[in-house]
């Protein structure tokens, strides 16, 4: 009887040490994705899921972004699931694992470059996993469809230097009704502030698109001896309610401004 008593006391002590509050361990909080807002195609607010640069490749990558959960102390990784099912309701596979705390990497951004095709909608959700391999419930589902990248970009006849206050941009694309021109000052790879942004209606003329800037006001916006770069984005249909987007980004084209003194 004494022996049984000690076994019972010992069992209670072990249980109280392993779970002093009497509460079963719970999985991490669900991941919350960064969701885009209508018309979010500008550098300041373009977040969530979007086309991402993939220089030299025919198609862009797809970038996914989420918020860090509140209880991150015991998190070890995020899991990214993807489906290319036409309705996005089945066939989700574990597509990637993002380890937390890797040097030089942002924990809450994943850029997908794997086996992507044009005009195919890809659906994603994210979960968080703690050090005991407990996995959270799923995040919201978001989706993206890659369109063809605008190409054959040209500025003033493919010039790399601007000397007069005239900028004639041209490119080829048949993808959408609207395009977005971005021009950035290029300080270095980590710092390239937005200088000019415009939404441009398609000309619907055999794919060639054109946009012109001119006037002395350009000399106040683009300083002499400054290094800049530009690109063209396409933005297709958006279903904000279901977080479904489409689009593409051209490769960057660099140029330098050296205003003529004559």
Image (cartoon, rainbow, N blue to C red):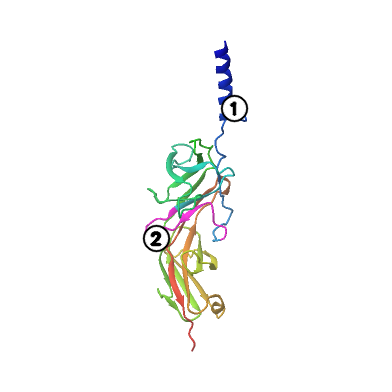
- Residue at the location (47% across, 64% down)? 232
Whether residues under marks 1 and 2 lie with C-beta atoms below 8 angstroms apart, the answer is: no
Q: Is mark 2 on a helix, strand or loop?
A: loop
Quadrant of the frame with the N terminus: top right
Q: Which residue appears farthest toward the top when viewing the image?
A: 1
- Residue at the location (56% across, 52% down)? 36
Q: In this view, does 163 lie above or below 126?
A: below
Give the magenta-colored segment's residue range.
44-61
Q: Nearer the viewer, residue 250 or 148?
A: 250
Residue 16 x %, y %: 59, 27
Question: Which residue bears the numbered disc 2?
Answer: 55
Question: Which residue bears the numbered disc 1?
Answer: 16
- Is residue 245 among the parts visible in the rendering? yes
Report crowding for label 2: few under 14, some 14 to 19, many 20 or more residues within 10 A (C-alpha): few
Q: Distance between the residues labelled 1 and 2?
A: 57 Å
Is 60 within the magenta?
A: yes
């Amino acid at each position: 009887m004494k022996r049984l008593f000690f076994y019972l006391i010992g069992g209670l002590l072990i249980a109280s040490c392993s779970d002093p509050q009497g509460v079963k361990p719970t999985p991490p909080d669900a991941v919350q994705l960064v969701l885009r807002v209508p018309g979010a195609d500008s550098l300041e607010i373009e977040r969530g899921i979007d086309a991402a640069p993939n220089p030299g490749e025919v198609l862009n990558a797809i970038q996914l972004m989420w918020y860090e959960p509140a209880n991150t102390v015991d998190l070890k990784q995020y899991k990214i699931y993807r489906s290319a099912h036409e309705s996005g309701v089945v066939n989700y596979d574990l597509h990637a694992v993002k380890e937390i705390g890797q040097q030089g990497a942002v924990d809450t951004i994943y850029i997908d470059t794997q086996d992507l095709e044009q005009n195919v909608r890809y659906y994603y959700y994210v979960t968080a996993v703690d050090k005991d391999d407990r996995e959270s419930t799923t995040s919201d589902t978001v989706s993206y469809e890659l369109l063809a990248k605008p190409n054959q970009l040209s500025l003033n006849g493919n010039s790399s230097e601007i000397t007069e206050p005239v900028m004639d941009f041209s490119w080829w694309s048949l993808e959408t009704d609207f395009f977005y021109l971005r021009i950035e000052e290029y300080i270095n790879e980590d710092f390239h502030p937005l200088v000019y942004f415009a939404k441009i209606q398609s000309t619907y003329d055999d794919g060639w698109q054109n946009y012109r800037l001119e006037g002395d006001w350009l000399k106040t916006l683009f300083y002499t001896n400054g290094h800049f770069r530009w690109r063209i984005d396409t933005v297709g249909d958006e279903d904000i309610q279901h977080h479904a987007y489409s689009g593409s980004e051209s490769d960057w084209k660099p140029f330098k401004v050296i205003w003529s003194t004559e």
